[in-house]
Image (spheres, coloured by chain):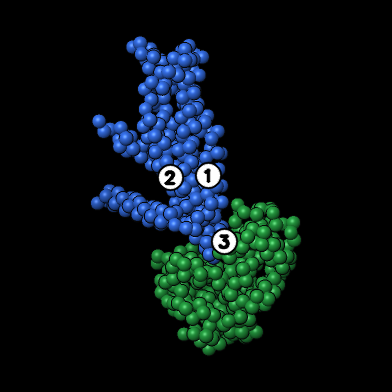
Chain colours: A blue, B green
Amino acid sequence: MNILAPLGRTLIAFLATVGRLAAFTARALSHAVRPPFYFGALGRQMLDIGYYSLPVVGLTALFTGMVLALQSNSGFARFDAASAIPTVVVLSITRELGPVMAGLMVAGRIGAAIAAELGTMRVTEQIDALVTLSTNPYKYLIAPRLWAGLLMLPLLVFVADIIGVFGGFLVSVYTLHFNAADYISQTWKYLEFRDVTSGLWKAAVFGFIIALMGCYHGFTSRGGAQGVGEAATNAVVSASILILVTNYLLTGIFFAAP
Amino acid sequence: MLPPESPAPALAKIALTGLRKAFGPKIVLDGVDLAVNPGESLVIIGGSGTGKSVLLKCLLGLLAPDGGTIAVDGEETTHLSGRKRTDHLAKFGMLFQGAALFDSLPVWHNVAFRLLGREGLSRREARAKALATLASVGLGPEVADLAPAELSGGMQKRVGLARAIAARPDILLFDEPTTGLDPIMADVINELIVKSVRELGSTALSITHDMASAHKIADRMAMLHEGRIIWSGPKREIDHSGNPFVDQFIHGRAEGPIHMQVRGG
């Protein structure tokens, strides 16, 4: 019984957290789709999540594409299938690595920043001040971040896809001595529209998850600087785990069907 | 039971009746009865952790009380939501203990926040009004475009006061307005509070444990102890209250019926 008690407490605590998160999400969504809309705040968040994340996401995509080409070459050369490298690179990048790597990088950069900012606003009573100024914090703080995450991650991933494929192209042509025209031709040959769109849908979901986790942990943080630090950590960890789990589920939905 | 000096709840600007709030097993407010006259400045005194801030947060709807009623202008407010709560909150201006200025916005935008939002003024009009309000609290236009973090604590409090009064609210709330300030700056803030309340004709409710501040800004004082109002009356009577709890508190004595908690919870 003594062994089961802590397990039970952990389970109850977990379910309570899930319940609070579900209630927060429902409330945030209901405010996100109803006016008033704060377009200035939305613009700032889109700039922060999209434009300012571009360098880190671009670099990640570039090196991911380059490594993918190198690894594919070393593996495929064993059974004389090096010609598949362009296809492997483009499919891996567009379907999986582009959205997942971008999602994880943005979770680290933006998820933590949102949680820290909202957490600081919470512990310094700025969120209470918003309420006293007749402004709904769900509409002013949460909704713009959710919309920005949802809209900007697909754009970021689209750019990351191009940069990632270009990284594979660079290594293949200049290190592995592929013919540039053949590489490009091979890249297009087996690429389907849904390979790209599935990655972009994933990106939209990941963007929503990142913003939601940042907002939830920041908005509900307590206890001063330590609480804000915990909120930032929890936002990144929970967003990262949810991205990986959701990626599996979405991949099953998009590609498991015959 | 309301003390005999208090206005009848129906005539009061703010009337709290039997207000209760607990956090888990800890009872913070245990049946607070309090009424504030229109145009009056009431200061609630009490030690740290006696529930003064919780009382203000319940009044604003930032915390939901467990029991009792809160009436503003005779209207029960504890169950307001949505648009009605937003309209209700428009009656209030609040100066927070740490000023609670929005870090991401320049000073003028902080002051003009409600003017730009709820009041719907243009940026030009709102900025002009913000500059005029800043001037009324002794701050020049040179601070308007600074970030709050660039200001001293006293200047932040002044900006917080300017933000609270910018939309000329009916009711002003002050949460520990002089905490963390040197005595001179504290007196400057007290003077500004008195001036603002008088000029706007607002009803003011302040909480503080700074007796110098309380004497300066109060028409009437009330003392909160162990979740209840244990004394209230005109400020001139507090020195002769005959209440040992009040006497110990206002003279800052360690010995007396009030035993300070050394641990939370």
Q: Residues within 10 Å of mark 2 (few under 14, many from 20)?
A: many
Q: Which chain letter matches label 3?
A: B
Numbered-mark total: 3
Q: Which chain letter matches label 2?
A: A
| Mark 3 or 2, closer to the camera | 3
- Compared with B121, B208 (above or below) is below
Question: Residue, x 40% and y 18% (percent of image)?
Answer: A186
Residue type pointed to by label 1: Met
Q: Which residue is mark 3?
A: B117
Of the numbered discs 1 and 2, the one sitting upstream in the chain is 1
Q: Secondary structure at mark 3?
A: loop
Asked if badges 1 and 3 are on one and the same chain, I answer no
Percent position of residue B102, x then y: 59, 56
Percent position of residue B212, x then y: 67, 74
**Which residue is nearer to you in this view: B109 or B189?**
B109
Percent position of residue A52, x then y: 56, 39
Q: Which residue is mark 2?
A: A208
**Marks 3,2: beta carbons within 8 A:** no
Question: Residue, x 47% and y 48% (percent of image)?
Answer: A147
In screen coordinates, is A65 left or right of B136? left
Question: Residue, x 29% and y 51% (percent of image)?
Answer: A8
**Disc number at residue A46?**
1
Q: Secondary structure at mark 1?
A: helix
Is residue B237 something one can see in this rendering?
yes
Question: Residue, x 36% and y 37% (percent of image)?
Answer: A247
**Disc number at residue A245?**
none
Cα separation between marks 1 and 2: 13 Å
Residue type pointed to by label 2: Phe
* Quadrant housing residue B221: bottom right
Cα separation between marks 1 and 3: 21 Å
